[in-house]
Image (cartoon, rainbow, N blue to C red):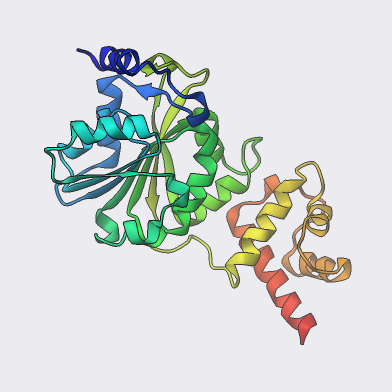
Amino acid sequence: MTLYQQTREFLKRTGRNANPKLGQHFLTDPHALQGIVFGAKLTDADFVLEIGAGLGFLTSVLAATAKKVLAVEIDEFLYAELQLKFSQAPHVSLIQGDILKLDLSTLLSSFPPQNTKIVANLPYYITTPVLWELLKHHRKIGACILTMQTEVAERIISPPGTKRYGALSIGVSYYAEAEIAHRIPPDRFYPSPQVDSSVLVLQMRDAPPVTVDNEALFFRTVRAAFQSRRKMLRNALLKNGVSISADALTTVFEQLGIDPQRRGETLDIAEFAALANGLHRELNTSAN
């Protein structure tokens, strides 16, 4: 049977439909599955954490090359099917659970970072939370190969000055080099989603491309700048939680030569780093 037929057979046998609350869209195109594995550049020394294993179609392709695959699936019916399918595959381990509630630090501690890869066909409704969670553990990950809504993937790789450029673009670029490997049309999934999908490859950086004195303040500055996209940078920072006086902020802008009337979407990551470092120095000076 084709993967499409296997999906239909499973749903008929279990009397179920794909669960929209879990964002279930099963990728049934073998070529697309191979494309994901190709993007991962898997070797027989690699450990793969797969998020959202579904019916195990991608799991099988990963297991054909990787040294070990740990597949996470939240749906109990799919998990039971995976147990049957991989009962004779000792290098495939399964976990039933919510990836956002699992201890990723422990799960990712068995292999060297350069051999640790995350592969996922992410439900669209949790793409951003999962992405931020993975970035928290960037030191333990070599690469992430993530299938997601094309709109989100394009936001991530968007350059400054474009409408899709935002906090997510900067946050990802701080930790990783990102590129869209290829796109997957809706009809390659069952049921077909209403949007196009893309495979985004993140190669984790050994070090960020900019130096910041206070990472928490850097990310707070970035978020503040984009929470009010239509506001000038000065007003956005004062409104959205950067705890500094208007006079002190004016001083920072003058020292850096940044026009406070610019909008956040026009600043690149280096300018945001310089701005956050300037705020950090000014706040420390005020405190002393």
Nearer to me, 201 or 240: 240
Residue 252 visible to the viewer: yes
Query: Can you say which quadrant of the picture contains the N terminus?
Result: top left
Instruction: Please give the name of the residue rendered at 18% of the width and 44% of the height, measured from the top-left corner.
Output: 66
- Horizontal side of residue 195 vs 84, given as left or right: right
Q: Nearer the viewer, residue 13 or 274?
A: 13
Outermost residue, bottom side: 288
Residue 157 appears in the rendering:
no
Q: Residue 88 in the image: state x and y as whole percent.
A: 11, 38
**On screen, 69 above or below 5?**
below
Residue furthest right as drawn: 247
Residue 18, by quadrant, is: top left
261 vs 3: above or below:
below
Residue 266 pos. (x, y %): 69, 46
For this rendering, which residue is in front, 36 or 96? 96
Left or right relative to 152: residue 207? left
Note whether 196 is above or below 43 in the view shown. above
- Residue 188 location, x and y as percent? 36, 17
Name the residue located 48 percent from the left edge and 52 percent from the top edge: 133
| Residue 66 placement, left or right of 240 | left
* Image spot of residue 161 (x, y percent): 66, 41
Place residue 103 in its image quadrant.
bottom left
Q: Judge left or right: residue 288 versus residue 192.
A: right
Residue 9 placement: quadrant: top left
Picture mark count: 0
Q: Residue at x 46, y 51 (%)?
A: 101
Question: The C terminus lies in which quarter of the figure?
Answer: bottom right
